[in-house]
Image (cartoon, rainbow, N blue to C red):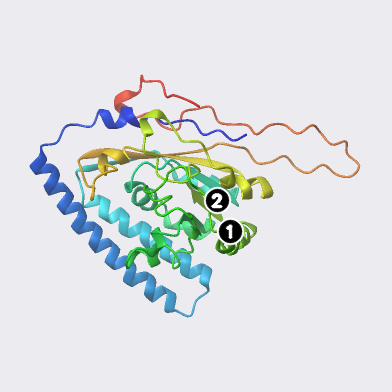
Amino acid sequence: EFTLFNVSLHLSTSLQPMTPAPLRLLCRVWFGATLAVACLLLGAATRVLHLLPISLELSEDLSVSTAAVLFRLMLRVNPQIRVINTVREADWDRLAACSPAMILMNHTSFFDFFLFTALLPPRFVRRAHVRTVMSASIAQLPFLGRSIGDHAGSFKVYFQAKGAGFGKGDASDFSVDRARQEAETARMEAHIKRRGVLAFCPEGGMNKTPSEGLNPFRRGSFAQAAKYSTPIWGAALHGSTAAWPRDALLGGDPSTVALSLEQLTLLPPPVATATAKPAEAAPPRVNRAPLFTPPAVKKARLSTR
């Protein structure tokens, strides 16, 4: 059984300062403008990379790295959003060294994708070949969808319910189009065999009630992890709902956001030789330390599930 500790997102968001409506509107307009510029540049860059006479894997790595650089620049020109990155370069190196691996992320806002991508070091992307798993509906977004979908090597989930996995539709219906999903599963397994890293949201979609903790994890999310005994890491995204409220058309509100990264399961034990007596299988070990505690609420105890 895999366990990811709940993050007290309601604590980090409830302590965000109240912003006057005119200032909040100005921040959202500026954020929207910088986001549009970043997406336009990314769309142009990935289309050029896709046409170059280079390998598909390198083209996808460069597309993901370009997205990381552009979204990081976007956040830097939005000073109303304070970014706290607790992940050290050594942590990314440890993750790359144990690849293939999987990164589990909580998902509460549209801002999650931009925050996680912005904090990915390009060197780690090229070394670990990071790819994401996303709803097929996201890959259909005008202009941006292709850049973060096919050009970035992302794996699609073909939900049958309209809007599922995208914060809309029936949140309880995670059924997929099996015929179309088989091809994506085959691509995903090939990526793991090449020692690539997968990042995905095990809840299956956007959490509508993050203050109540994480939603149940989808069993299918761990199919490849169980099949290939891949190490599992947890990436906790904090404050995203304050930066981009779930029901808001656009984000950019004054807020503090953060990313933390921890290894949740250790590498599997070595396979016993034919002459050695097989040892009793031990359950996966989990890092019991909280992923991140917002500075303003260090004394608050994180809830667990």
Q: Residue at x 49, y 50 (%)?
A: 199
Q: Which residue is mark 1?
A: 178
Q: Residue at x 32, y 24 (%)?
A: 297
Instruction: Residue type at mark 2: give it.
Output: Ala
Instruction: Residue 116 in the image: state x and y as whole percent.
Output: 39, 48
Q: Residue at x 52, y 68 (%)?
A: 57
Q: Residue furthest left?
A: 22
Q: Nearer the viewer, residue 300 or 171?
A: 171
Tell me how far mark 2 sits from mark 1, CA to CA. 31 Å
Q: Which residue is mark 2?
A: 96
- Residue 205 appears in the figure: yes
Instruction: Residue type at mark 1: give it.
Output: Arg
- The reply, left or right, for residue 154 in relation to residue 300 is right
Camera-nearest label, 2 or 1:
1
Instruction: Residue 182 in the image: state x and y as whole percent.
Output: 60, 61
Instruction: Residue 265 in the image: state x and y as whole percent.
Output: 60, 37
Instruction: Residue 154 in the image: state x and y as whole percent.
Output: 48, 60
Q: Residue at x 62, y 34 (%)?
A: 1
Q: Nearer the viewer, residue 291 or 123?
A: 291
Badge 2 or badge 1: first in the primary sequence:
2
- The reply, left or right, for residue 285 in relation to residue 68 is right
